[in-house]
Amino acid sequence: MPRSVIQAKCSRYLQRGQPARRTPIINRDDYTIVATYGAEYRGIVQYYLLAGDVQRLHRLRWVMLSSLLRTLASKHHSTPTRMARKHQAKIITPSGPRVCFEATLHREGRKPLVARFGGIPLQRQKTAVIDDRQPDGLHHPRKELITRLLKRRCELCEQTGHMNVHHVRTLAELGPPGPTQPAWAAVMARRKRKALVVCDTCHDHIHAGQPTTLTA
């Protein structure tokens, strides 16, 4: 495992070369803080379990643990040593007992949640499988209004070309239905839309209070 990889992983938890607290998560509860560090550490270790020198991640564990304890200490106005005594635990692994650090979230009427940092033997696993899944392409569906604009067709007279969007703040502004309600307002009320895609001519007529050609 290249030394540069370990240094890069450690750098996230260092300031001026020393383990530092993580201010962005300092106001979260202990369970969330420990769970955050635990998930990040677990992901890195499991990725490198095939490496023959995976034990070199002890450096990363020390840096992350020091950062975790300093974060908890800052939250509780305490010291890292006291936080270590409070959260230290021992678990049994296939490689024997291991020291870890836990935080428990008690829930009324339900089983408590336990977040854990560490407790993973840094021993090579020749049968480990790395599943580098290709991320699915993110699909961001277009907003319905954008789709209507791209059609470049007036929703009143169906003329094509340059389009505008006429807005109202609320549907109540369209007025009561009936013969006094403008045609464009009736269309918006019927479709329950506060925006209408219209051509330049219809847009001008709407603002001038003139009748619009309605074919939609």
Image (cartoon, helix red, strand yellow):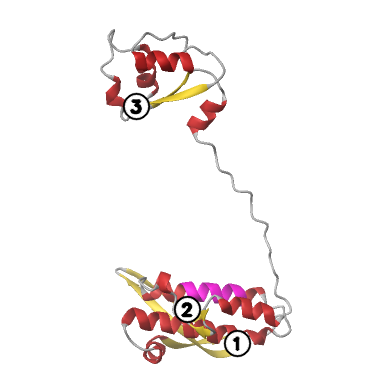
Given the image, on which type of amino acid does mark 2 rest? Arg
- The relative height of residue 12 versus residue 92 in the rendered view (above or below) is above
Lateral position of residue 49 relative to residue 18, left or right? right
Please, what secondary structure does the residue beneath circle 2 have? Answer: strand
Categorize mark 1 by other alpha carbons within 10 Å: few (<14), some (14-19), many (20+).
Answer: few
* CB within 8 Å, label 3 to label 1: no
Q: Nearer the viewer, mark 2 or mark 3?
A: 3
Evaluate if marks 2 and 1 touch, with contact meaning CB atoms under 8 Å apart: no
Which quadrant of the view contains residue 171? top left
From the viewer's side, name the closer residue of 209 and 56. Answer: 209
Report the front residue among 137 and 167.
Answer: 167
Residue at the spot x=50%, y=35% of the render?
Answer: 143
Distance between the alpha carbons at the discs numbered 2 and 3:
53 Å
In primary-sequence order, the first of circles 2 and 3 is: 2
Given residues 113 and 203, the one toward you in this image is 203
Q: How far apart are marks 3 and 1 (CA)?
A: 62 Å
| Magenta stretch in the rendered image | 36-45
Q: Is any part of residue 61 visible from this angle?
A: yes
Circle 3 is placed at which residue position? 168
Q: What element carries label 1?
A: helix
Q: Which mark is residue 116?
A: 2
In the rendered view, would you say 92 is above or below 196?
below
Q: Given the image, on which type of amino acid does mark 1 rest?
A: His
Q: Where is residue 149 in the image (x, y as percent from the top left)?
A: 52, 27
- Residue 121 makes an appearance in the image: no
Magenta stretch holds residue 126: no
Which label sits in the foreground, 3 or 1?
Answer: 3
Q: Looking at numbered disc 3 in the image, what kind of residue is underneath it? A: Val
126 with respect to 72 (left or right): right
Residue wearing tag 1? 58
SS class, disc 3: loop
